[in-house]
Amino acid sequence: MSIKDNLNTIKESLPSHVKLVAVSKTKPISDIEEAYAAGQRVFGENKIQEMTEKQEVLPKDIEWHMIGHIQRNKVKYMAEYVALIHGVDSLKLLREINKQAKKHNRVIPCLLQIHIAEEDTKFGFDENDLNELIASNEIGELSNIKIVGLMGMATFTDNGQQIRKEFKQLKNLFEKTKSVFPDLSQLSMGMSGDYKIALEEGSTMIRVGSSIFGSRN
């Protein structure tokens, strides 16, 4: 199956309101060009440097999403062009994004990353942290960022019930947060291995790499 075929197969199964982020991290420019030629415009990268190098040579109507863990000192390299930052896991990071966005006279959309997995390796806010952040006055003063939704990663497991439970938890939190932040519209959950469950549980954005581009080396 070609990249084009893989993309078409996935897109045919998606509800119209769900955005597909093609995870192109570690993949060569030629693969992205092939996906672009097949109509894909949203790509996700997990390293700011790699994303910036690709952004410089690829068509300018591509929407670049930063989906990896972010080092604050690197935010400045993507502030000019990034379309959405998925992995925002601290107020310090929000401050830095706000500061760099201001330099480019932009408002950068962000997703707050929520820790839902049972593994300790995943980053993100827990429910208490999230409530504290929302209650803090400071978040309203950061005028160059816009929190548009939540993001989370389920435990890496074959146990579908556990994955479903974690996605349900994130969806419930999303609905609660929405009552405070009416602008919240994006729920980014689901990757190649579990996006079908994520869709059933209310995801509006899935991040798919290997099912499009083939497995990574």
Image: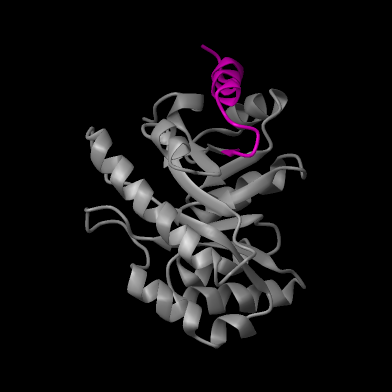
Q: Nearer the viewer, residue 127 or 106?
A: 127
Which stretch did the figure color magenta?
1-20
Where residue 96 sits, quadrant-wise, is bottom right
Q: How is the image coloured?
A: one colour
Where residue 61 sits, quadrant-wise, is top right
Q: Is residue 5 magenta?
A: yes
Residue 92 visible in the picture: no
Q: Nearer the viewer, residue 54 or 214?
A: 214
Residue 109 vertical placement versus 99 (above, below): above
Q: Is residue 111 left or right of residue 123?
A: right
Farthest residue, direction top: 1
Residue 124 vertical placement versus 205 (above, below): below
Farthest residue, direction bottom: 137
Residue at 69% x, 23% y: name it.
38
Residue at 62% x, 66% y: name it.
182
Residue 159 visible in the picture: yes
Q: Position of residue 187 (x, y in %)?
A: 52, 51
Where residue 105 sits, quadrant-wise, is bottom right
Q: Is residue 41 left or right of residue 105?
A: left
Q: Position of residue 71 (x, y in %)?
A: 45, 67
Q: Nearer the viewer, residue 91 or 199?
A: 199
Q: Position of residue 78 (x, y in %)?
A: 62, 61
Total marks in image: 0
Residue 90 vertical placement versus 149 (above, below): below
Q: Is residue 175 left or right of residue 51?
A: left
Q: Is residue 117 magenta?
A: no
Residue at 68% x, 46% y: name it.
63
In which quadrant will I find the C terminus? top left
